[in-house]
Image (tube, grey):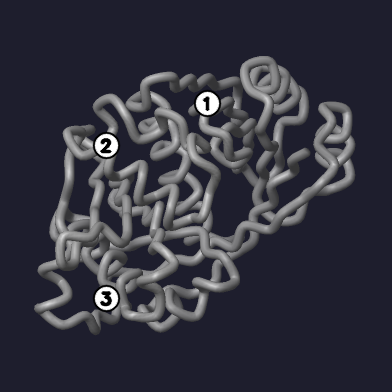
Amino acid sequence: MNVIGDRMAAAYDVAFEDLCAATPKGYHARRGTARAAVTHAGAATLNVAYDLSPTPDLEALDEMAAEVGRQVEAWAIMVRGDADSAVVELAARHGLSARSALPLLACTADELVYRTDEAQRERVRRVGAADSDRYADVLTRGFEAPDGLFGSLMGGAVLDAERIDGYLYEEDGQFLGTGLGMHTRGVVGVFNIAVVPSARGRGVGRAITEEVLRDGVAAGADAAYLQSSALGRPLYESMGFRFQENWTALHA
């Protein structure tokens, strides 16, 4: 049993529901331990039928998958650990035959390592809904995604939501990076760490991540989690995060 993983999975579940409630076209539904979460963004992992329990409820997950697939073209089924044959077969029936590993990293507040100097910290600022268009633009460029991929994901009142904090990194009048903190169940989830290509390797991602974590801890979080790419993992491990478990996304 992975107690830390269980806690972070529960926090992630609430965070995804919060995001769906705040984003303009969001949809969220529950059946047993399975969930349907739809943001209408163009990325498969932002429209997900998922069950983060140790033993997924296949019938409920199948129902949630049908609902998500009805609403969007790009979507995924997500479970903790390596998807077993029953989940793989379920996904295949919905046309989802590819799989991606989503490493979950976590740490306690006491384990966090901060290294960003004061001058760079001052370039990271909290933003609200009034900055949603700029935020979406920098997020898109930071992930080198096609224009419009994220749709209205960060629009509406998302950046003004009570448990969601958005961040932009600004230097010499240029906006170079984004971050997002989501506060649920006494932990802070770190999302949307994206740096435009021209600014990489200068500590921008670290500065943004640290600010998300500082604010989360100041607001009462005693732990943090994130899902990391292979490229970003060394950075997060240098900040105190440790691998907890893999999740699996099954997609087209």
Q: Earlier in the sequence, mark 2 or mark 1?
A: 1
Q: Do the CB atoms of the residues marked 3 and 2 lie less than 8 Å apart? A: no
Q: Position of residue 252 (x, y in %)?
A: 78, 38
Mark 3 Cα within 10 Å, few/some/many (few <14, many 20+)?
A: few
Q: Which mark is residue 185?
A: none
Q: Position of residue 232 (x, y in %)?
A: 50, 71
For marks 2 and 1, give the one nearer the viewer.
2
Question: Which element carries disc 1, helix, strand or loop?
Answer: loop
Q: Position of residue 5 (x, y in %)?
A: 52, 58
Q: Which residue is mark 2?
A: 132
- Dot 1 amino acid type: His
Q: Nearer the viewer, residue 90 or 121?
A: 121
Above or below: residue 43 compared with residue 122:
above
Residue beneath the point at 30% across and 45% down:
135
Residue beneath the point at 45% across and 53% down:
8
Q: Which mark is residue 40?
A: 1
